[in-house]
Image (tube, grey):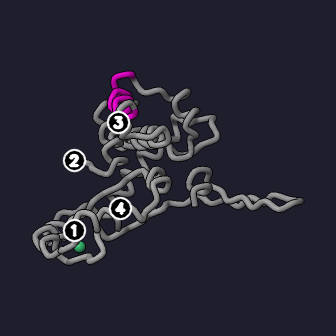
Amino acid sequence: MRQPMEQGEVSIDRTEVTIRFPALFTLVMAANPCPCAAAKVIQCRCSPAVRARYLSRISGPLLDRVDLKLSLAPATRAELRYDLENAESTAEVAARVLEARERSLKRMAGLPWRSNSEVPGPELRRLFPPPPESLLPLEAALQSGTLSARGMDRALRTAWTLADLSSRDTPAPWDTAEALALWQGHPT
Ligand SMILES: [Zn+2]
């Protein structure tokens, strides 16, 4: 699982030959917060230790490679109704994503990549260095041990995507801070 997540391909080594299969994909995982998975948080009777043990079944190295981690609360009826009336259409969101994609494509003109997610970490830092003040949130987290080296590259890619979505030429400090919070799993 880690190799395709990291390299976008699966390679099978045999004595005579190595075969490579392309494996670029978007991985979406979902998990209950605890074993009882009560419909309402208030009904959960799991102890903190049970909850912690349950969540620790997802391996650290796998979570290290997940760019966006979100805790979702059950949707209320009011929220569902609001969504029905006010949510953007898929077409509107698709247009925004296309625009962001075009921004990143333009930045990578002449380079072998088509999206932020494809740029290898070292190249990302060398070719597209964000302004020093935008790196501060990531460097502070790296220093304090709440961000891994791999997470640093992943958060940097997310920050570029956030900048592309907001039509900014480079990630702002709040883009890197948001990318960091998304990687750590507690966005505001
Ligand atoms: Zn529970």
Q: Residue at x 87, y 60 (%)?
A: 15
Please name the predominant secondary structure of the magenta segment in the image. helix
Query: Above or below — where is 146 with respect to 136?
Result: below
The residue mark sitting in front, 1 or 2, is: 1
Q: CA distance from mark 4 to mark 3?
A: 27 Å
Mark 3 sits near ligand 1, with its Cβ under 8 Å away: no
Mark 2 vs ligand 1: CB below 8 Å: no
Q: Earlier in the sequence, mark 1 or mark 4?
A: 1
Percent x, y for residue 60? 45, 54
Q: Residue furthest left?
A: 78
Specify start and end residues of the magenta stretch as a single range.
132-142
The amino acid at mark 1 is Ser
Instruction: Name the residue beneath numbered marker 4.
Output: 91
Number of residues whose C-alpha sits closer than 10 Å to that of mark 1, classed few (under 14), some (14–19) or many (20 or more): few
Confirm whether residue 171 shows in the render.
no
What residue does disc 3 label? 176
| Residue 188 - label | 2
Position above or below: 54 against 99: below
